[in-house]
Amino acid sequence: MPKKIIKKGKKKHKNKPTSKKYSKYKIENGVVKREKYCPRCGPGIFLMVTKDRSYCGKCHYTEFTSKKAEE
């Protein structure tokens, strides 16, 4: 005979982490500021920003920032 699986009550409720998309919006002086959108995908898809480029993970669009413009 196969072993019986015994369940021991209900699982504990775990809170899900909040979405990181809300960290992309900031309110300053009553105006909503948001990070850069992807020009190909449109609003709702944000670009990942690093020190030397901006990148879209969905369509792989990349914008490089020139070093001379920063200096």
Image (tube, rainbow, N blue to C red):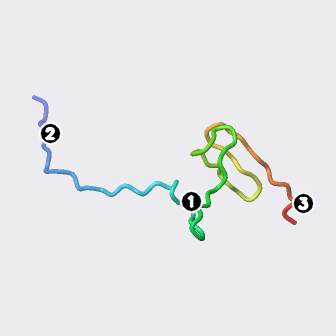
Instruction: Label 2, secondary structure: give it.
Output: loop
Q: Which quadrant is the C terminus positioned in?
A: bottom right
| Mark carried by residue 25 | 1
Which amino acid type is shown beneath numbered disc 1? Tyr
Image-based side of 53 in relation to 3, left or right: right
List x then y, in percent, for residue 52: 77, 55
Q: Residues within 10 Å of mark 2 (few under 14, many from 20)?
A: few
Which residue is depicted at the point 56% across and 59% down? Answer: 25
Mark 1 residue element: strand
Q: Quadrant of the N terminus?
A: top left
Q: In front of the other: label 2 or label 3?
A: 3
35 or 1: nearer the eye? 35
Q: Quadrant of residue 50?
A: bottom right
Query: CA separation, marks 1 and 2?
Result: 48 Å
* Sequence order check, earlier mark of 1 and 3: 1
Rendered residue at 71%/50% (across/down): 54
How many numbered discs, if any? Answer: 3
Task: State the mark number for residue 5.
Answer: 2
What is the three-letter code of the residue carrying label 3?
A: Lys
Contact check, label 1 and label 3, Cβ < 8 Å:
no
Q: Nearer the viewer, mark 1 or mark 3?
A: 1
Instruction: Measuring from the top left, give residue 3's x and y in whole percent.
Output: 13, 35
**Residue 68 — which label?**
3
From the top left corner, tell me how far across and down residue 69 is, in percent: 87, 60
Depicted 27 relative to depicted 2: above or below: below
Label 2 vs 3, first from the N-terminus: 2
